Image: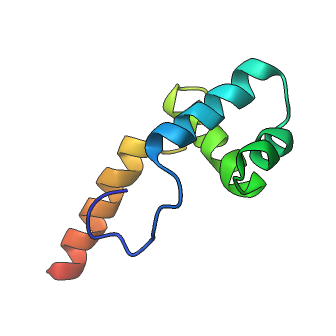
Amino acid sequence: MGSGSNRSRRYSEESERNAVFLVRSSGRTVTEVARELGFSAEGLRNRVRQEQVDRGQGAPGELTTAGRGEKLRRLRELARE
C-alpha cells in the first residue's frame, strides 16, 4: 500500500507473499492455509488471484498491481484538478 492510504495493513507484504507461495506450492486450499496462518480466506484468495494477474495469467484487461497503482494515481490527480 502506498503512503496516504486510509486502509490499515494487518499483514506485512512479506507474510502475504509467503502465504500466497504456500497456497501455490503446497497443494492445500486457500481456506486451509488462511486458517493456519490467521488470514481471512477471502483476503488471501484475492491476493492469490492478484498474484496470478501480476504474472500475466489473468483475464484480458485485468490490471496488475502496478497498473492499479497507476490508475489510482491518475484518478487522484484528476480529482485535484
**In this view, which residue lies farthest toward the left?**
81
Left or right? Give the position of 61 relative to 3. Answer: right
Q: Residue at x 71, y 24 (%)?
A: 24
Front one among 75 and 46: 46
Q: Is residue 79 visible?
A: yes
**In this view, which residue lies farthest toward the top?**
25
Q: Which residue is drawn at 19% across and 70% down?
A: 77
Q: Residue at x 67, y 55 (%)?
A: 43
Question: Considering the image in quadrants, where does the N terminus appear?
Answer: bottom left
Left or right? Give the position of 66 relative to 21. Answer: left
> How many numbered callouts?
0
Colouring rule applied to residues = rainbow
Percent x, y of residue 50: 58, 42
Q: Is residue 59 visible?
A: no
Percent x, y of residue 21: 63, 27
Percent x, y of residue 81: 14, 80
Front one among 39 and 62: 39
> Is residue 42 positioned above or below 30 on the image?
below
Q: Residue at x 58, y 32 (%)?
A: 18
> Is residue 5 positioned above or below 18 on the image?
below
> Is residue 7 positioned above or below 73 on the image?
below
Percent x, y of residue 23: 73, 30
Left or right? Give the position of 64 relative to 44. Answer: left
